Every structure is written in structure tokens, then in C-alpha cells.
Amino acid sequence: MKIGLTGSLASGKTTASKIISSRRGPLFSADKEVKKLYTQKFFKNLIVKKFKLQLDKSFKKEIKKKILQKKKNLRKLEKIIHPLVRREMLKFLKKNRKKKFLFFEIPLLIESKLQKYFDVTIFIKSKNSLRLKRYISRGGNIKLFSILDKHQLKDSKKMKFCDHIIVNNKSLSILKKKLSNIINLYE
């Protein structure tokens, strides 16, 4: 069974995906794959060329600046990243096809029209003020949060495509209980 977790920026997807997959099956994280890309020379060279950047230690900061300067740059970046991440997702699927459960944390699952790959989708929802607080606590800035958040579909639209919705505005123990109730339906 392939279970996809999605949600808006800083809603708690990573935490939820780690909890629900723990001791149940392998977890594919689109965000982790993107982080890996940023360590690979071929990817860095591709980005440097596309955005006319210098390849140095502030490489990621420069990309963020480009996005803050021009929102179209986010789309340009996604056109490079998304096919590479999707390729890794398909490799993960193939490698783990015999496992009982496979878990996928994919922030733009709905926006990327990936629903067909999953038997069950779970949407993690949090109120905007809490998401912003989480994002800033991880070193993000308000303007970039706003750009990235507006780039995603509204929660109300995304939820229509999901089998389960978890509101994550309370404690970690409540989140664990909600996730446990969902996974128990399929175990």
C-alpha cells in the first residue's frame, strides 16, 4: 500500500511522515531528495548556468534571492527539480515494491498531479499563523514564506483530493494519536 502525505508549507508533514512510517515501512521524502540534489555537482552546475550564479558557499542563498526578486524563478527552479525528484520516487517505488507499506512525504503532491501513484493520501493541515511561526523558527523569512505559500494550492482545494485530513494545531501526542487512528484502518 502506497501512502502519500502532503500539506502546506510548515504544516508538520515531515514529523507526521516519520511518525506514521516508523517501523511500518520505508519513507520517501521529496524534501530530502531536493537536499541531496543541492549536494550534487551536475545539479549545481545546471542551476548556476540557468540562473547565472556563482558556485560558492552562498549558492543556496543566491537562489533564494533570485526567487525573492522574481517569482517566475521559482517555476524555473521547479522545472529542473521536479523531474529529478520524480525519477528518484519511481526508483524508490521499484526498489520497495514488495513491502507491505510505502510512505511518501511530498509537499506538492496535488500540485504535481501525483495522486495516481498512491492508494491513500493524507493531508496535514495547520493554521497559517502556526505554520509561519514554525517556518521562521527553522530560519526562514516572512517574504519567502509568503511567496512559497501563495505558490501552493489553497488547503481547501488540496483537501478535496485527499482521503484523510489531519489538523495539526495541537501537541505531538495528539498528532500521533490521529495518525495511529488512520494507519490502523489499513493494517
Image (cartoon, rainbow, N blue to C red):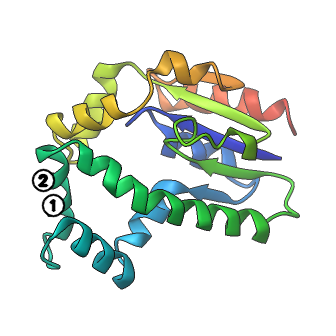
Check residue 61 in the rendering and tell me which mark sits there, or answer none: 1
Image quarter of the C terminus: top right
Q: Is mark 1 in CB contact (under 8 Å) with mark 2?
A: yes
- Compared to residue 120, the image places residue 78 above or below, namely below
What is the residue that sits farthest to the top in this orientation? 156
- On the rendered structure, is 105 left or right of 138? right
Q: Residues within 10 Å of mark 1 (few under 14, many from 20)?
A: few
Label 1 residue SS: helix
Label 2 residue SS: helix
> Relative to the observer, which residue lies in front, 175 or 86?
86
Cα distance between the residues tagged 1 and 2: 6 Å
- Compared to residue 2, the image places residue 40 above or below, namely below
Locate residue 182, reporting x and y percent: 74, 29
Which residue: 16% across, 34% down? 142
- Compared to residue 57, the image places residue 4 above or below, namely above
- On the rendered structure, is 179 left or right of 167? right
- On the rendered structure, is 137 left or right of 65? right
Check residue 168 in the rendering and tell me which mark sits there, or answer none: none
Q: Residues within 10 Å of mark 2 (few under 14, many from 20)?
A: few
Which residue: 55% across, 24% down? 158
Residue type, label 2:
Lys
Locate residue 7, reporting x and y percent: 50, 33
- On the rendered structure, is 174 left or right of 67? right
> Relative to the observer, which residue lies in front, 66 or 169?
66
Locate residue 111, reporting x and y percent: 52, 37
Which residue: 64% across, 50% down? 104
Kindly indicate the quadrant of the structure image that contains residue 81: bottom left
Residue type, label 1:
Lys
Check residue 65 in the rendering and tell me which mark sits there, or answer none: 2
